[in-house]
Image (cartoon, rainbow, N blue to C red):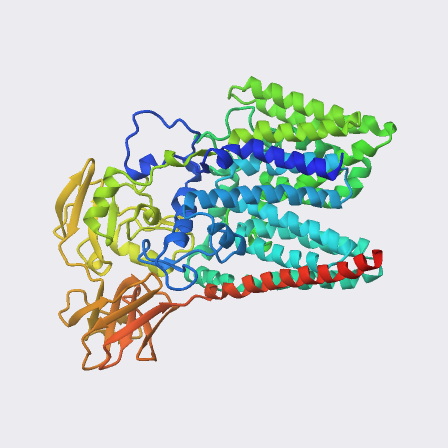
Amino acid sequence: MKRTHALLVIVATFLALFWPCLLRGFVVYPHDNAQETGLSREAPDSWPSNRKFSDTSSFYVPEVHEHLHGDHEAWLATWNPNVELGRPLGQVSGFSPAFLLTRVLAWTTDDAFVLLTRITLVTFLLAALFAYFFLEELGVKVEVACGVACALVFGPYATYWITCVLFAAGWCWTFLLLWLVASFVRVPSGWKGLGIAFGAHALLMTSYPQQIVWHLYALVPFTIHRAWKHGGERRVARLVGIGGCAIAGVLCALPVYADLALAAQRSTRGTADHTFFLQTLTGMNGTGEPWLFLAQLFDAFWIGDPMSEARAFSGVTLTPFLAAGLALACVGGALRRSWGWLVLVAAGIAMAFSKELYFVGVDYLGLSFSRYTPMAGALIPAAVAAAYGFDAALKRVDAVRFAWCCASIPPIAIAVVTYALRPAPLSWGWVAIGVAVYVATVVAAATKRAWSLVALGVLAALAWGRAEVLMRPRDAIATTSPFVEDLRARTKGLRYAGAGDVVSRLLPPNQESVLGLSSIHSFNSLSSRAYQDWVTRVSETGTRTYGRQFRKITSAAKLEDGELALAGVVLIASEIPLESPAVERVGEFGSVTYYAPREAPVHQALFTEFTRDEKGTRVDVRGTARAFAGTVNPRDDRLLVGFEPPAKDALLFVSQQFHPQWKASADGRELETVAVNGFYQGVIVPAGAREAELVFEPWSLLMWIPQLLFVLAAFACVVATVARRRPASAAGR
C-alpha cells in the first residue's frame, strides 16, 4: 500500500463520518436547546442528544458567538458584559481568533454553531493525518499506520466527546509534535522547526489543560529518547533545536496564559480537594468499577448505548480492533519497541484501580488542573503500542505465532466474564460485532494480511465511532422562543436575574450572548472569589462546583439589601413565588412569573460621598450623595462615562465586576481603579473632571504579534525553499 492510498482512505473515512456537516448543513451540537429556551416540543427530539455535554451549549458556542458578534473596539473581543456582571472572554480551547487557525476559519462564517463545527472537522481531519504521518515515521507498515490512525481518531472516544473539540485538539497537535520531533531528529529543516513551534503553541491554545499534562509525559521522554538514539553524533544539537523551537511556541502563547494565570489566581479552583477529583473515577464522567472499566476499554457497547444520558461513562474505550493490537504489543519484539508507551498505559489503568495512586498524581504529578480520566491521557500511547503490535505481527517469523495467539486471549476474556457477571442485559448485536472484529483482527495479524487491518481499522471507526456522533441540522437548534422574546422585550438589553430550582434547565447561564440577553448568572470554571462572595449576597445557595455555576436565586431571603439595584437588575424571571417587599410582581409568561425590584437600578453613578479604609472602598446604595453618570457610545471593552464635574474627588461607580485589567483615564491622566463594596468596578475621579474613559487591556491583545511572527516565519521558509531549489534545477539543466 502506498502513502497516497493510505491518505485517500483516511479522507474517505472522514467524509463517511462527517458528510452531513459538509453537504447538508448539519452542525455538531448535543441537543435541541428547547428546554433551555422554554419551548414545549409536541414530539420528542428526533436527533441523537445528550445534555451531559451541556458545556457546548452553555460555554463553547456562547464564547464563539461573543467572539464573532461582541461589540468590541480592539481587534480581539476580550470582555463579555452579558454574564457574571461582566467577565474576561476566554481565549483558549481554540474558540478565539487569538489562535491563528480559528482566526482564519472565522473569516468563513458569522454563525457560532457553524464555526465551531468547522473547527471540529478541521481538527479531526488534521489529527488523523498527523497520527498517520507519525506512525509512518516510526517505521510501521503503511497499512498499520492507516488502520490505527482511523480507528483511534475517528473512533468512539473522540466521537463520544466530539462536542468538546478541545480533546480532539489535544490529539491533533500532540501527533503533529510527535511526528515532527521524530522527523527533525532524522533530518532537521526550517519547516520542521517552525512546525514544532506552531504545534507547541497550538497545543497550549486549543487543548484541555489536564490533557496537555498527560501528553507531556509522552512527548518529553519520546523526544529525549528519539534524539539520543537516532540523532547520531549531533544528538545534543538536535535536542537543543527541538527544545528551542518548542520554547518559542510556548512563548507565543504567553500573553493568553498570563491572563489565564490571573484568572486562576482570582478564582477558587486551586482549592479543590480530593473529593472533587474522585468524581473522575466514580462520577458521571468516571470509569466506574475497575473491572467494568477494563471491559469497556475493550468494547463499551456490549451493555447498551454509551451515549445514553442515564449511563455513567467516561467515553474511554479502544474498540476490539485496537485492543487486539495492544495485546499483540505485549509479546516478543513488539514489547521491546513499545514498552515505554505501555508504561503510560499501565499508569492510566492502575489509577482506575487505585484512587490512592490517582491522588498521588493529583498532589505531585500535575494532575490537579481539572478532572480528567487518567486512561484518556494514555490513549495515544495505547494506539502507538497497538501499531507496534500489529507491525510486529506482520513482520514476525512463524515460530512465535503461538505466543501472539495466547496474548490475544486476556482482553476478550476480561470483557466476556465482566459483562456476563453483571445484571444488565447484553446488546447481542454489538457483542457479535465486537467478537467478530476482534477475532478477524487477530487472524489478519496472524496471517499477515495487511490490507485486512486497514479495512478493520476503518470498520472500527465507522461502526463504533459513527454511533457516537452528536450532530443535527442547524435549524433543529432553538436560539429563541416566545418566552425569550418576551424576556428580551421586557429587559431591553439590561440585566435580569433568574430564580428557582438550581437544577432547572430553563435559561442556563452563559447562553445569554446567543439569546440576546444579559444576566447576573455564570458558567465559568474560573469565576472570581469576589463574584462567588457576591452571589451569597443575593442567594441563599451560592455558586456550585468551586464557583463554576450560578444558575438561580433560590429564595427571596436576600433581596432586601439593595444589591440587585447595584447589579443593575431590572427584572427577575422566577419559577418560584418570591414574597419580599423588595420586589413587585409585574407579569408572567407560562410558568414563569416576572418581578421587578422596587429600587431603581444603578448602572453608572458618581458618588461624592464614599468610604475608603483598610477594608476597601464602599458606598451606600441608598445614599443621596450621588449624581447621574452616563456612558457615551459604550463598547464591550471601552466605556466613556460623562458626568457633572465634582467639586472634590469622587467615586465613579460602574455596575460591572471589578477587574484589575480595566484601565481608567481622564484628560490623558491615568486614574486609580478600585473594587467598590468588594466587587463592583470603581474609579477615583479628581475634582473638575467631566468624563472618564475605561478600557479593558488584557495581555491577550498582544496575540497579533505571535500570529504575525508565524506568518513571517512561514514566508521566510517558502523563500528559503524556493532559493534552494532554483540552483538545483539550474544544475539539472
Q: Quadrant of the C terminus?
A: bottom right
**For this rendering, which residue is in front, 167 or 340?**
167
Residue ID at (59%, 29%): 462
Q: Quadrant of the N terminus?
A: top right
Whether residue 33 is visible to the viewer of this picture, yes or no, is yes
| Image coordinates for residue 472, horizontal then vertical, percent | 43, 33
What is the quadrant of residue 228 in the picture?
A: bottom right
**For this rendering, which residue is in front, 623 or 453?**
453
Vertical placement of residue 392 versus 415, above or below: below
| Image coordinates for residue 682, horizontal then vertical, percent | 29, 69
Left or right: 181 as drawn, with respect to 423? right
Residue ID at (66%, 59%): 194
**For this rendering, which residue is in front, 421 or 210?**
210
What is the quadrant of residue 678 in the picture?
A: bottom left
Residue ID at (65%, 28%): 320
| Image coordinates for residue 618, horizontal then vertical, percent | 25, 69
Left or right: 707 as drawn, with respect to 246? left
Vertical placement of residue 590 versus 167, above or below: above
Whether residue 546 is visible to the viewer of this picture, yes or no, is no
